[in-house]
Image (cartoon, helix red, strand yellow):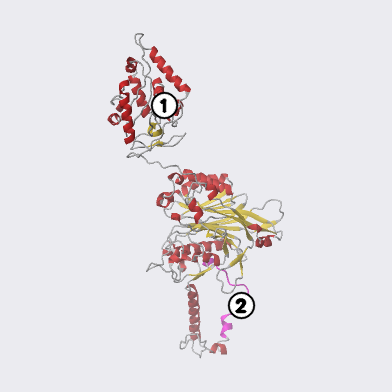
């Protein structure tokens, strides 16, 4: 790199220059290699172009010159003050290799050319030609310094040396002198600040780091502003709450906070982000501040890195008044799900972590997990003898793979079976349920419809279509299709998403007939008529039954076999159901913008994959209407934090950004749980 420094110094007698030769050379070495804590020197070299030299620094220079003159022999005379131009030519810089890191290497460097008065015009001409050929792009910044690494050299800071006629953008060093030699102070005053010269157009220098103008700061607060939607003032809600029924109000947040390990494993997904905003030390305070600002009572987190949870998140949440539970993904995965609740608002009744991995089952061979908690709300004092129903809270993160909708469906079925076990009351009904999570499925996909409508006919459906909207694989010739049964009976889960061991027993009061009682009717007219749909087996199902015990046993065996075939046919129908009556907090559409809501934005494409479902009461729908309608029951939706659309997130450079430190938006809803008298 060619550096040219033009400065003005006072030219004393020849002997004075000879005596101070080493001082100037040491000064230059110190300036090029050292960094100084001295704010006096550092301030001079960090000064912007056109800034005047402070008076105290001029006084120091004058004092140094006077001291040097006093040390001269009396016989020496001091000539008139003249101007000298000291030039660091490219040959001198390359030959001495001043950018080395040890001072011992500099001891072998050639001396700086000292120019006499008669050489001043030649040096000025040389400086002009070098500026035209090797001008460095000027860094327009003040007052703060920035450092630039050029070709493996030491850090350089922006400064603008000046002459009477022209100015070039030049690299100045972040100085740190090794001593407080007055010669160093004198050299630091080597800029002429009396006039502001015109700025020459900068040309790029080979191997220089390109600098781009700093863009105008994006108003993230304004772009990403999210309104709080108060739903308690809507007529349908007012009608249900106007009975003077007290409510236990609480807030629930669901948030995929983006595990740092997943960031580092998939940097290609975040090429639009500045590396600094992807750093965990930057993201963590942002995430905690956001959670603390919205102040949820129940917090469901996904993609929580295990070491970050135990070392940072859990201690912080406990200080915020949360009780926390965590479940890491199985296998070698380092992240998982967490559910936290404020112990001043809820008490834990039961906890059930779920692992979706089942050895030997291809339909459940992934490491995703979930958590299901049963919480008892803590009523405030002064309400008298009141009661409130327990609350079931579930949190999960379902498999991402868009091609394996069959696995996602099986994982959700396992989760619903666990919720069915935890939320079921002794009377056979369910306590209120809130289901949060990243389901990696878009609204109106078959998986979404299954959760909301309680039923899905999946037989023959392409696996990718179960999560239609993530990716479209309809053009593939051979796609995986879902076949019934979706999972084997060994899993112990029925097609109603219930554990076999917990299925409802037979209704009480049902009549049971003894064998002897039924045998009394074996020769009745109804028994002698063969039903049209009954398969004709000679001696077994023919029209002439006999009363022998042997043949009666054969008839009994056929009936048992027929019953088992009917049960198996029901299992193989390709229809799964659940009876939890869940609906979504969000409508997934922004009517004021005419655009769909977005909860995440992978690769610049917005999508909704995060949800909060809650228990509601179904409303009788019109004939032929597939979508189930709901109204609030004991659990009422009182408000929600609005979501954003894709075009708004694009204005903020997508997700993550300096304002939102995850690639997902948080979901927040306010609920009211009816409080009843005992």
Residue 589 colored magenta? no
Q: Looking at the image, which residue is at 41% across and 37% down?
A: 139
> Compared with residue 619, is residue 305 higher up or lower down, i.e. above or below?
above
**Residue 113: image x %, image y %?**
30, 24
Q: In which quadrant of the rendered image does the N terminus lie?
A: top left
Q: Magenta stretch: dominant SS?
A: loop
Q: Nearer the viewer, mark 1 or mark 2?
A: 1
Nearer the observer, 127 or 213: 127
Which residue is identified by label 2?
511
> Residue 371, percent across and down?
52, 56
Q: Are marks 1 and 2 in contact (CB under 8 Å)?
A: no
On screen, residue 155 versus residue 618, left or right, reads left
**First of labels 1, 2 by sequence position:** 1
Mark 1 crowdedness (10 Å alpha carbons): few <14, some 14-19, many ≥20: some
Residue 274, can we see it?
Answer: yes
70 or 52: nearer the eye? 52
Residue 500 magenta: yes
Query: 137 or 228: which is nearer to us?
Result: 137
The image quadrant where one finds the C terminus is bottom right
Q: Residue at x 55, y 63 (%)?
A: 420
> Spatial distance from mark 1 to mark 2, Cα to Cα?
110 Å
Q: Quadrant of residue 436?
A: bottom right
Task: Tell me where the magenta segment starts and ends, as one range.
Answer: 499-519
520 up-or-down from 320: above or below: below
Locate residue 62, reporting x and y percent.
43, 18
Residue 361: in sight, yes or no?
no
Secondary structure beneath dot 1 equals loop
Tell me residue 351's x, y (percent): 55, 56
Label 2: element kind: loop
Question: Circle 1 is placed at which residue position?
Answer: 192
């Amino acid at each position: 790199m060619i550096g040219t420094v033009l400065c003005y110094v006072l030219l004393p007698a020849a002997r004075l220059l000879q005596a101070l030769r080493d001082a100037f050379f040491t000064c230059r070495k110190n300036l090029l290699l050292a960094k100084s804590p001295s704010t006096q020197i550092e301030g001079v070299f960090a000064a912007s172009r056109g800034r005047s030299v402070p008076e105290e620094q001029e006084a120091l220079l004058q004092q140094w010159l006077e001291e040097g003159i006093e040390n001269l022999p009396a016989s020496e005379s001091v000539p008139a003050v003249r101007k000298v131009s000291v030039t660091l030519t490219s040959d001198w810089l390359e030959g001495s290799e001043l950018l080395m890191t040890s001072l011992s290497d500099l001891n072998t460097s050639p001396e700086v050319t000292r120019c006499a008065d008669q050489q001043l015009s030649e040096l000025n001409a040389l400086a002009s030609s070098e500026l035209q050929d090797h001008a460095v792009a000027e860094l327009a910044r003040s007052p703060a310094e920035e450092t630039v690494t050029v070709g493996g050299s030491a850090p350089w800071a922006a400064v603008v040396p000046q002459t009477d006629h022209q100015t070039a953008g030049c690299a100045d060093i972040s100085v740190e002198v090794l001593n407080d030699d007055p010669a160093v102070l004198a050299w630091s005053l080597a800029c002429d600040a009396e006039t502001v010269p015109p700025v020459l157009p900068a040309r790029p220098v080979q191997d220089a780091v390109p600098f781009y103008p700093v863009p105008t700061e994006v108003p993230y607060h304004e772009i990403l502003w999210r309104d709080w939607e108060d739903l308690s003032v809507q007529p349908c809600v007012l009608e249900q709450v106007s009975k003077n029924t007290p409510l236990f109000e609480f807030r629930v947040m669901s948030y995929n906070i983006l595990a740092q390990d997943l960031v580092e494993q998939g940097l290609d997904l975040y090429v639009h982000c500045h590396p600094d905003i992807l750093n965990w030390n930057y993201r963590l305070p942002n995430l905690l501040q956001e959670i603390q600002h919205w102040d949820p009572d129940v917090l469901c987190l996904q993609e929580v890195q295990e070491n970050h949870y135990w070392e940072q998140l859990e201690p912080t949440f406990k200080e915020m008044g949360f009780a926390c539970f965590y479940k890491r993904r199985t296998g070698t995965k380092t992240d998982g799900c967490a559910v936290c609740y404020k112990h001043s608002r809820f008490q834990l009744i039961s906890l059930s972590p779920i692992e979706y991995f089942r050895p030997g089952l291809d339909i459940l061979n992934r490491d995703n997990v979930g958590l299901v908690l049963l919480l008892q709300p803590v009523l405030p004092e002064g309400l008298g003898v009141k009661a409130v129903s327990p609350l079931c809270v579930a949190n999960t993160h379902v498999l991402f793979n868009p091609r394996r909708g069959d696995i996602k469906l099986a994982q959700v079925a396992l989760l619903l079976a666990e919720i069915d076990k935890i939320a079921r009351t002794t009377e056979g009904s369910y306590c209120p349920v809130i289901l949060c999570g990243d389901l990696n499925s878009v609204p109106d996909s078959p998986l979404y419809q299954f959760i909301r409508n309680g039923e899905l006919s999946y037989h023959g459906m392409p696996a990718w279509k179960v999560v239609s909207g993530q990716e479209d694989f309809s053009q593939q010739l051979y796609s995986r299709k879902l076949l019934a049964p979706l999972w084997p009976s060994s899993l112990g889960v029925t097609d109603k998403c219930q554990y076999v061991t917990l299925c409802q027993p037979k209704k009480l009061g049902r009549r049971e007939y003894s064998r002897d009682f039924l045998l009394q009717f074996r020769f009745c007219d109804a028994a002698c008529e063969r039903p049209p749909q009954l398969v004709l087996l000679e001696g077994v199902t023919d029209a002439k039954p006999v009363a022998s015990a042997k043949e009666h046993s054969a008839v009994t065996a056929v009936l048992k076999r027929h019953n088992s075939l009917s049960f198996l046919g029901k299992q193989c129908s390709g229809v799964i159901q659940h009876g939890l009556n869940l609906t979504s907090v969000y409508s997934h559409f922004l009517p004021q913008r005419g655009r769909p809501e977005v909860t995440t934005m992978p690769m610049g494409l917005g999508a909704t994959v995060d949800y909060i479902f809650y228990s509601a009461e179904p409303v009788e729908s019109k004939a032929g209407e597939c979508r189930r309608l709901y109204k609030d029951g004991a659990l009422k939706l009182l408000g929600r934090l609005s979501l954003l659309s894709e075009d708004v997130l694009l204005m903020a450079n997508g997700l993550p950004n300096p304002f939102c430190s995850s690639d997902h938006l948080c979901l927040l809803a306010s609920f009211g749980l009816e409080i009843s008298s005992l």
